Amino acid sequence: MASLQISGSVKFEPFVGFNRIRHFRPIASLGFPRFRRRFSIGRSLLLRRSSSFSGDSRESDEERFITDAERDGSGSVLGFQLTPPGDQETVSTSTGEITHHEEKKEAIDQIVMADFGVPGNRAVEEGAAEVGIPSGKAEVVNNLVFVTSEAAPYSKTGGLGDVCGSLPIALAGRGHRVMVISPRYLNGTAADKNYARAKDLGIRVTVNCFGGSQEVSFYHEYRDGVDWVFVDHKSYHRPGNPYGDSKGAFGDNQFRFTLLCHAACEAPLVLPLGGFTYGEKSLFLVNDWHAGLVPILLAAKYRPYGVYKDARSILIIHNLAHQGVEPAATYTNLGLPSEWYGAVGWVFPTWARTHALDTGEAVNVLKGAIVTSDRIITVSQGYAWEITTVEGGYGLQDLLSSRKSVINGITNGINVDEWNPSTDEHIPFHYSADDVSEKIKCKMALQKELGLPIRPECPMIGFIGRLDYQKGIDLIQTAGPDLMVDDIQFVMLGSGDPKYESWMRNMEETYRDKFRGWVGFNVPISHRITAGCDILLMPSRFEPCGLNQLYAMRYGTIPVVHGTGGLRDTVENFNPYAEGGAGAGTGWVFTPLSKDSMVSALRLAAATYREYKQSWEGLMRRGMTRNYSWENAAVQYEQVFQWVFMDPPYVS
């Protein structure tokens, strides 16, 4: 096996990028001493291949490789990219294709980091504004590793897939090096084609867990500036969605996602993506309980041996209700040292135990992530507060309250290219905030498609989402007869609880001129409902962020929502007397969660639509001009990235 030796001179020149203590960080993995504060590597290093192990000491220019030193924003060398001399032509070891390396030279400006103190719920937005981060590129770039159970378009069951399919692309566009790690699901359907362009890297890693050794492999696709890495194992190859099938959740989900977490910790160390690894100074962004073992593994299995000492982890909570709870006896399956049981140990309250002899002992993976991650992000500012309350904490509220100084809420973005009423391929007519005249034609086309009377003057209410208790479907069911008395039309799209699906069919039979229910999910229909309806109803009991209200506002459809989580954050209650009578707000927020308050809000919205057209158009335009792009969210994430590296690892 050949080794690499450093050859050639190293020149030191004055450099303007400093870290907070005005020194460059040491590169322990390469054996470099701490740099003086005014020195840096001033030119590319020259590496030559050594064949000392084979006894061959011949050297030639053809065997030499030039390497560009990769640095972070503070000047620390993160790794080296190997490229041949001369015309810089490289051959990819995985595909054999010839590519050309283009030299990139960027001026590095001095980094000014403001001291924001202890962040509050809104400190992310305020801090990003104070720094004055430009909209194009980040001032400090990082090696980011997203670990997730799903990422669109490869796999998706809800908002988690949307976030992990879009946010990495936005961050890569701002200059960060981004890897997304998720399982390679193969379920025997057309969705398997999503992985067709991912190539086997030929690297195998052995994971010790569940009482034995498991071998996993890695597939890779480079798309939109992001390294999409898929962990492959036979447990990911089965019919159904990522978590279960028609019979319920898979019984081995703990095993499947334990494999994902172990493989994700190895990937930055062993995968030479783009010619070099991500290295030990990586920032892991772990999403929900499925990736929750990652910060625990960093603290328990890597840092004690000097690995990942400069790495950090951020837990992103999309839905606290799902925590990865299993019996306490399964702890030995996780591949953690025995002394780390306290990190994931969990005891159910007495009232939640199944019988008198039940001790309530369990392992809770999400709890372990909360106590070992360096910072915590939720998908809205309102949800960041709700998870610290008894009503929204699901038993973890006290633990989360103890860490509230490192909890921030950042509202999810939306794909503004896919959801754009001026270019949307799924809607028959296009419009924009400057000219909304074609929206009424979308409404009439939807009425015709659904077989409803074509009445442009009649307020049309829409609902898109899962048919379950969380989404408040029981409230809509209870209010149905009252709403059908009014002169409105109501359209629902969704699937879920069979009893609500049957109710939708019965409503359609009873109120054929007013109600339509589409059981299932259809992307083109969801776009046409969003564009064609006047009002979108979201009576969710809890909603960490919510995306449909953002889609609706972008399409000039007015949201009527329950005041919870991200719904309360993103929808501003309409005030017709603000701004000297011009009005303010983007929709209606009702509370408490009751049939009467919901019906009152809907009737007020319908009356405004009929009688106050100027106010209604103001509502539409204000919603359509709001910035909920992923680029806006990415800037706020970067503020948290700066904070997470200011302190040493929370568990060292």
Image (cartoon, helix red, strand yellow):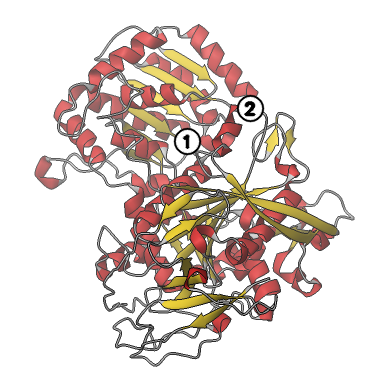
Task: Give the residue type at disc 2.
Answer: Thr
- In space, the residues marked 2 and 1 are separated at their CA atoms by 42 Å
Residue 290: percent from the left, percent from the top?
A: 64, 52
Q: Quadrant of the C terminus?
A: bottom right
Q: How many labels does the image show?
A: 2
Residue 251: x, y in percent?
A: 78, 42
Residue lying furthest left: 580
Give 20 or 385, whichever is nearer the viewer: 20
Q: Residue at x 50, y 91 (%)?
A: 33
Instruction: Say what secondary structure mark 2 lies in.
Output: loop
- Classify mark 2: residues with Cα within 10 Å, few (<14), some (14-19) or many (20+): few
Looking at the image, tell me whether mark 2 or mark 1 is earlier in sequence order.
2
Q: Position of residue 238 (x, y in %)?
A: 72, 35
Question: Where, by quadrant of the figure, is residue 331 drawn?
Answer: bottom right
Point out the residue furthest to the bottom here: 36
Instruction: Report if residue 210 is visible in the image.
Output: no
Q: Which of 285 and 613 is in front in this view?
A: 285
Q: Do the residues labelled 2 and 1 touch (CB within 8 Å)?
A: no
**Percent position of residue 543, x then y:** 48, 44
- Residue depicted at 57% across the width and 76% down the height: 650
Relative horizontal placement of residue 263, taking residue 482 as reference (left or right): right
Please give the residue where the numbered disc 2 appears in the rendered image. 189
Find numbered disc 1 in the image and state the secondary structure of the residue it sits on. Answer: loop
- Numbered tag placed on residue 225 in the rendering: none
Amino acid under label 1?
Answer: Ser
**Quadrant of the rendered structure where residue 562 is?**
top left
523 lies above or below 637: above
Of the pair 413 and 532, the residue shown nearer to us: 413
506 with respect to 426 (left or right): right
Answer whether residue 466 is visible to the viewer in this image. yes
**In the visual, does 139 lie left or right of 273?**
left
